[in-house]
Image (cartoon, grey):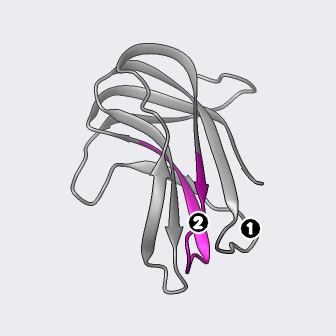
Amino acid sequence: MARTGKWSVALTRTGKTAAGSPSYRVSPIVPIKPGQKWHAEAWARGNATTGTTQVAVSWFDAKDAWIGGATSATLPTGTVNWTKLSVDSTAPAGATSMQVHLKSGGNTGTVWFDDVAMSMS
């Protein structure tokens, strides 16, 4: 199920715990510096979704401890055509790395993600 090209990634029948939601993640290869502004986006499509589907940015310190983050709007539940989800976030003090998460938790259906992009401004 691709929006463009031949492939996408999917999450189906996902759980959710206090530790978080299942996700795919990617990190930029450039060093992160506090104060940098980052934008992340992905297109998502849902089939009979019930949970929370978002794009998120997570910030980590030099010891790889989570120090903050931001999330996009949530993909509507049910059967939804391709919808762009985006999030903007500024690296907090102490940030040395970041991850972009394509996540879906508490979902009894399937969600697909495609055309993922991140950029620093």
In the drawing, does residue 118 fall left or right of residue 101?
Answer: right
Residues at marks 2 and 1, CA–CA distance in whole angstroms: 10 Å
Asked if the residue under mark 1 is in contact with the one under mark 2, i.e. CB atoms within 8 Å, the reply is: no
Compare residues 49 and 89 and report the one nearer the observer. Answer: 89
Q: Residue at x 58, y 22 (%)?
A: 1
Q: Position of residue 28 (x, y in %)?
A: 70, 62
**Which kind of residue does numbered mark 2 sit on?**
Met
Q: Is residue 120 above or below residue 84?
A: below
- Relative to 39, does residue 114 appear above or below in the rendering? above
Rendering quarter of residue 4: top right
Residue 90 in magenta? Answer: yes
Is the magenta region chiefly helix, strand or loop? Answer: strand
> x and y percent of residue 86 in the render?
59, 37
Q: Is residue 60 above or below residue 73?
A: below
When asked about the image quadrant of residue 94, the answer is: bottom right
Which residues, given as a range, are shown in magenta?
88-103
Q: Which residue is mark 2?
A: 98
Q: Secondary structure at mark 2?
A: strand
Q: Residues within 10 Å of mark 1 (few under 14, many from 20)?
A: few
Q: Residue at x 60, y 66 (%)?
A: 91
Where is residue 59? Give x, y as percent.
52, 67
The residue that mark 1 highlights is: 29
Considering every residue shown, the one lying at the far bottom of the view is 63
Residue shown at 39% from the left, 27% from the top = 110
Q: Quadrant of the C terminus?
A: bottom right
Q: Nearer the viewer, mark 2 or mark 1?
A: 2
First reached walking from the N terminus: tag 2 or tag 1: 1
Residue 101 or 35: which is nearer the viewer? 35
Secondary structure type for disc 1:
loop
Circle 2 packing at 10 Å, graded few (<14), some (14-19), many (20+), is many
